[in-house]
Amino acid sequence: MNSKAFVWIGMIVGSTVGGFIPLIWGGGAFSFAGFITSGIGAVAGIYYGYKLSKRL
């Protein structure tokens, strides 16, 4: 797989997981906190997807 695929997969998985984090403390997935944590998760997923693509 090329590095673009790893970055996309990381972004999708990271934003999905990040969007569900507010549910842990009782917030909503479609709240402002869900939006912010989804963005943070997407950035983290892009970073780790890029790092993983360079390692393989």
Image (cartoon, rainbow, N blue to C red):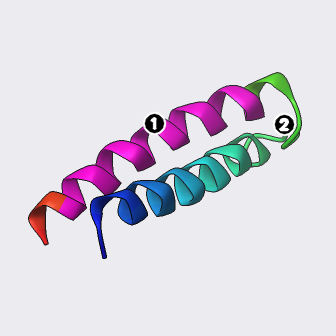
- Residue pointed to by mark 1: 43
What number is the disc on residue 18?
none
- Given the current orientation, which residue lies at the most extreme left position? 55
* Residue 35 rendering spot, x and y as whole percentages: 74, 30
Check disc 2 and report its element: helix, strand or loop: loop
Q: Nearer the viewer, residue 27 or 44?
A: 44
Q: Nearer the viewer, residue 1 or 37?
A: 1
- Residue pointed to by mark 2: 27
* Residue 54 rendering spot, x and y as whole percentages: 14, 59
The C terminus, quarter of image: bottom left
- Given the current orientation, which residue lies at the most extreme bottom position? 1
- Is 45 covered by the magenta stretch? yes
Which range of residues does the magenta coloring cover? 34-53
What residue is drawn where x is 11% and y is 64%?
55
**Marks 1 and 2 close (CB-CB < 8 Å):** no
Neighbourhood count class around disc 1 (C-alpha, 10 Å): few under 14, some 14–19, many 20 upward = some
Q: Is residue 6 left or right of residue 36?
A: left
Q: Is residue 12 above or below residue 1?
A: above
Q: Residue 46's quadrant in the figure?
A: top left
Neighbourhood count class around disc 2 (C-alpha, 10 Å): few under 14, some 14–19, many 20 upward = some
**Amino acid type, label 2:** Gly
What residue is drawn where x is 49% and y is 56%?
8
* Residue 53 rendering spot, x and y as whole percentages: 22, 62
Report how far apart the C-alphas of labels 1 and 2 lie in the structure. Answer: 21 Å
Check disc 1 and report its element: helix, strand or loop: helix
**First of labels 1, 2 by sequence position:** 2
- Is 55 covered by the magenta stretch? no
Q: Is residue 13 left or right of residue 32?
A: left
